[in-house]
Amino acid sequence: MDRQMKGKMNLAMGSGGSIVVEQCQVCGFPRLEEVLFLGYLPPVNKMVSVGTPPCEQPSYPALLLYCPQCRLVQLGLIVDPCILFPPEYPYTSGTTKILRENFVDLYRECVTIVKLGPDDLIVDIGSNDGTLLSNFASQHRVQGITPEKIGELAIQKGIPTLVSYFNREAVNKIISEKGQAKVITATNVFAHMEDIHEIVNCIMDLLKPEGIFISESHYVVSLIETLQYDTIYHEHLRYYSVSSLKYLLEMHGLEIIHVKRIPTHGGSIRVYAARKGVYPVRDTVRNILRDEEKFGFDREKFRSFKEKVILSKLALHSLLLEIKKQKGRIYGIGAPSRASTLINYVGIDDGILDYVLEVKGSYKIGKYVPGTLIPVVDEEILFRDQPQYALLLSWHIAEDLIPKLKQKGFKGKFIIPLPSPHVES
Ligand SMILES: [Zn+2]
């Protein structure tokens, strides 16, 4: 209780600033170990219009920490969401083909695990434009909840959506209007929300006794294996392994009953949990925990991760240096959040990258990449200018991107920045 009270007073949300993490966000352990420091990064959604003279802008330290007690990898600073998502940021769905296919897969898998009838309620936390729930909507009752205006788009599509943060008040409203949920989903949001114990308490209240909670999160093992330092930014407060999620969920009486590794965001985990003893625990859980044990989360693993990240950054520098010595022109492809971390951490500026390209309609067009004077422009320019090189900032979907760009007429070469920087024709 004491710790919870203390936690409440120390929330970044609503503070207008940030909070330094001095004890583990999950277990409260005070001696967190430093893994990697990416320097001070600007908020990824704070984008200034091209032509604006550079002016004062905030940056926040991005220090990755490891808790040896519950094994959680976490960021050392929590920034108020009102800074990370400024009012001028027009929330877009970001729903790509790979995500849509993933949600179809989630639905198919979910109904093999839990029996769902027409009256059963499915609640999606962070429901965005309602894409996940649209898979359930024809057969069951659904309820989305999202703090973003885009929730209104979901409502237009016929997905009931509460435009609100997921908190006690929202949960009470859903329970009083629709009752408890048989399934609660939280995809790519469970690692983003502050005050995680209050969030899980709310989930427990909303979940029927035989209900299932499904979360999808970027997987820290993928992050380490493929050196995805570019997924480290302030929206991502925690980087879960199955063992650290198990620790968190067990604190609230939940048990992991099934786990699947999925390809979204460069490697994620889909984790099914229920109240302890209600469902059989599948072998997938024991297997992945055993694999994590073999993988090892220790000082040596993180020391070697840091060393590899630094060598990878320097290798990218060398590669860019050789191209620039030959007067090669390089355009960046895609401006997702992770591009901002990569560009700022590696130190890429407008003398190295002429432009970063986004598809037509992106709100990022006409703005600078955060922390730089690199303009984001319409992708069309790539096919007109034909620079010698395209730097893939969404390198984790290179297999999809390269054929598409070639098909649209790009004749240059591709720079893949991670894990091992190289050029592909
Ligand atoms: Zn911990």
Image: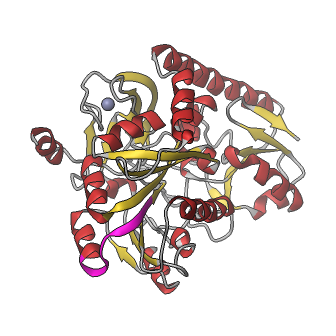
Position of residue 369 measured from the top left corner of the image (x, y, whole percent): 55, 51
Q: Based on the displayed image, in which of its 4 quarters is residue 207 positioned?
A: bottom left
Q: Residue at x 31, y 70 (%)?
A: 180
Q: Say whether residue 16 is left or right of residue 188.
A: left
Ligand number 1: quarter of image: top left
The verdict on residue 402 being magenta is no
Position of residue 363 measured from the top left corner of the image (x, y, whole percent): 56, 67
Q: Residue at x 35, y 36 (%)?
A: 247
Q: Is residue 151 above or below residue 44?
A: below
The verdict on residue 177 being magenta is yes
Position of residue 313 measured from the top left corner of the image (x, y, whole percent): 62, 27
Q: Say whether residue 245 is left or right of residue 8.
A: right
Q: Is residue 329 above or below residue 410?
A: above
Question: What are the residue bounds of the magenta stretch?
Answer: 176-185
Q: Quadrant of the N terminus?
A: top left
Q: Quadrant of the C terminus?
A: top right
Visible in this render: residue 147? no
Q: Residue at x 34, y 44 (%)?
A: 249
Position of residue 278 measured from the top left corner of the image (x, y, whole percent): 38, 53
Q: In the image shown, does 81 or 106 lie closer to the viewer?
A: 106
Visible in this render: residue 200? yes
Q: In the image shown, does 98 or 379 lie closer to the viewer?
A: 98
Q: In the image shown, does 196 or 250 lie closer to the viewer?
A: 250
Q: Residue furthest top?
A: 300
Q: In the image shown, does 161 or 352 lie closer to the viewer?
A: 161
Q: How is the image coloured?
A: secondary structure
Count of residue discs = 0
